Amino acid sequence: MTSTTANTPAITPRLAPRLSGEVARARARGQPLVALESTIITHGMPWPQNLETARRVEREVRARGAVPATVAVLEGALHVGLEDEQLEQLAQARDVAKLSRADLAACIARGGTGATTVAATMICAHLAGIEVFATGGIGGVHRGAELSFDISADLRELALTPVTVVAAGAKAILDLPKTLEVLETLGVPVVAHGQDALPAFWSRDSGLAAPLRMDSAAEIAAAHRMRARLGLGGGQLVANPIPPEAEIPAADLAPLIDQAIAEAETRAISAKSLTPFLLQRIFELTDGRSLEANIALVLNNARLAADIASRLAAAAG
Ligand code: PSU
Ligand code: MN
């Protein structure tokens, strides 16, 4: 007699993400892959610059000899690598859900559509065997978090999931010293690329020293591998400064950021809506200059991520 429990596997098989043709071929050949998030497309930039940037980021990764894998949930299917039409549909879609670790399973199970944040993109990249991920800026500890408790799930994800994330630091809308403290508590290496200071997204220098500095993709790739060999789990945060010609000096931005935060408070905007609101207001208050800077830094991060992925692929062979 078969027991009813015999049909229940001891280990639930992992979900196999749906791969784009390009990503499937790259995986089969062991080519370097770079994951890309989609919340930056749906919630981080306005149409049509969002689509244009997403395409340019993918091209930049390819030009550097790696293959881009943009992550999103489309009608209940987890996609790692989007075909161009899917990218375009997502960029134009309205009311797309913003998916972090807490939201991912429910969205897929219900057949929903959603864009992945840094945290959710790390989870999906790891499911697909991708070790490097490029974005703009990660979420962090919001100012006033001692009262609001608003700390992005991105930070905890970096402690859990073994993906190296290349960002331009944390956005200056956040409390950067507290963000660094939380990352340290969680055991996440924070590596400034090519300089001693922690970059602050739209500006190259946050005024804070980065805990670690590395000057090459090879060094970053070696540290990534060593974490795995030590059984440490978790990823690394690589903070890559915005190119000098694209930066907005911190002093120019500070009053605009204060204004945007004050408006968010007056309008009681919080939780998931806060980061998209602040980015949109800063875009308006800088007459679009913040968006130009954002685009330049994402492209720059895509290049470094492709170089790190190439080093990892070469070392794996
Ligand atoms: N970086 C950008 N634009 C963005 C984001 C990052 O340049 O829109 C998104 C990322 O998806 C990040 C999220 O994971 O903001 C953080 O949101 P929250 O603070 O709600 O965790
Ligand atoms: Mn939050």
Image (cartoon, grey):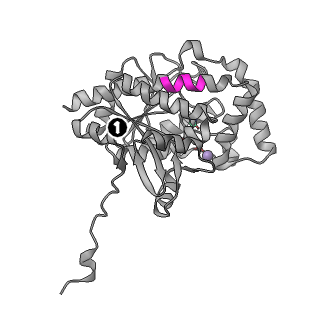
From what the image shows, is residue 225 above or below residue 270?
Answer: above
Residue 297 located left or right of residue 4: right
State the residue position of label 1. Answer: 131
Residue drawn at (57%, 31%), measured in percent from left and top?
170
From what the image shows, is residue 74 above or below residue 63?
Answer: below
From what the image shows, is residue 55 above or below residue 81?
Answer: above
Q: Give the quarter of the figure containing the C terminus.
A: top left
Which of the two residues, 245 or 54, is positioned nearer the viewer here? 54
- Is 28 contained in the magenta span? no
Location of residue 183 in the rendering, given as x and y in whole percent from the top left corner: 50, 37
Q: Which residue lies furthest to the bottom in this view?
A: 1
Query: For the magenta stretch, what is the residue range?
Result: 293-299
Main SS of the magenta part reads: helix
Location of residue 38 in the rendering, given as x and y in whole percent from the top left corner: 51, 41
**Residue 108 in view of the camera:** yes
Say which element carries label 1. Answer: loop
